[in-house]
Amino acid sequence: MSMTKQARMVKRVFNRAVGLPLKRLFYHAGFAKGSYIDSDGLVRLRKLEIYLTNGCNLKCKFCSHFNPYRRGIVPTETLVTSMETWSKKVRPKKFGLLGGEPLMHPDFPLLLRKARECWPTSRLIVTTNGLLVAPKGEALVDVLRETGAEVLLSEHLTDEKGCAAFDAARTTLEHAKIPTTAIPSASRWKEYYFFDDHGKPLPYKSRPEASWTMCGPNTSFNLTGNKLYRCSILANAACGWQEGALGDEWKVTQTYKPLEPTATADEIVRHLFLMSGPLPACSICPETIRFVDARQIAAKGTDE
């Protein structure tokens, strides 16, 4: 085990054995509520994400959203309702709009404006593979500029055509002075599941305790279907099973219950920050962090 992994494990084990009990003690004693809930009664979050689409114009192996198997866009009404509902409950420092490929959503400009309306002081971050930036042209640039959104360009392709499209996207955004960060995702892709001999994605059957310890459980909060999930991987896998895109091997994800729109500030804090864990559904992830090179399973059209 590398020193980095050892240090990560020691830190998380210490947090669970000492840090988390202290946090719960201080919170329930009334000394630390202000660390989680602001003066308006909204729960402070470092980052919150919402997925605009289930489909993507790429088919990355080991995709954490299971895009090679899921399809379509999330209905605009569902997304608007989610943002309006939870903006009255949480205040994220960063609010991310992702997919799939978020730029495939026909109402992307409306949704980005709604995000800014709901969270006027949050950093809005759009994560995209960049392939649709140039085709969307000035209309995309205008709404990004209007809302003050930032773009996270995630590079998944290493072939000549893919690199050219990615470079064109970066050039378009930088010339428009849109804050842009490029990430070479193709060279550092996390493996969250494995495949059988027929290419079927399967969950791990890890010890939940081991997966929980190696995970970053408080960094991936997610809005899906107007419910608040503490883990984006779990949200994607659970919804994939409900849609029939993933097999019965993933049914364990249904043992986790996300927060409903009726959740109070106290319930949100307990669920996201003070849960002792591990969850039975944590078993779907590997016990150690694994990195692989991103690979495309097959080409897909941008209208899928």
Image (cartoon, grey):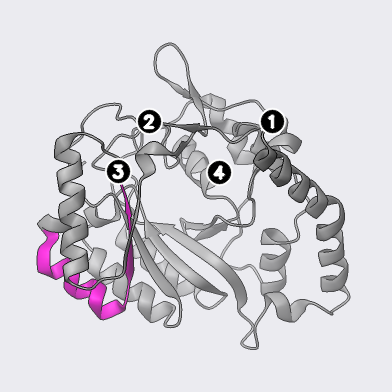
Instruction: For label 2, count other residues whose C-alpha is less than 10 Å away and answer few (under 14), some (14-19) or many (20+).
Output: many
Residue bearing mark 2: 61
Which is more N-terminal, label 3 or label 2?
Answer: 3
Closer to the chain start, of discs 3 and 1, is 1
Nearer the camera: disc 3 or disc 1 = 1
Q: In the rendered image, which quarter contains the C terminus?
A: top left
Magenta segment includes 63: no
Identify the residue under disc 4. Answer: 234
Q: Nearer the viewer, mark 1 or mark 4?
A: 1
Please tell me how crowded label 3 is: few (under 14), some (14-19), or many (20+) other residues with Cα within 10 Å.
many
Q: Nearer the viewer, mark 2 or mark 3?
A: 2
Q: What residue does disc 3 label?
A: 55
Q: Mark 1 points at which residue?
A: 1
Of the residues under marks 2 and 1, which one precedes in the sequence?
Answer: 1
The answer to the question of whether label 3 and label 1 lie on touching residues, with beta carbons closer than 8 A, is: no
- Sequence-wise, the earlier of marks 1 and 4 is 1
Kindly identify the residue that appears in the image at 40 percent across and 13 percent down: 198
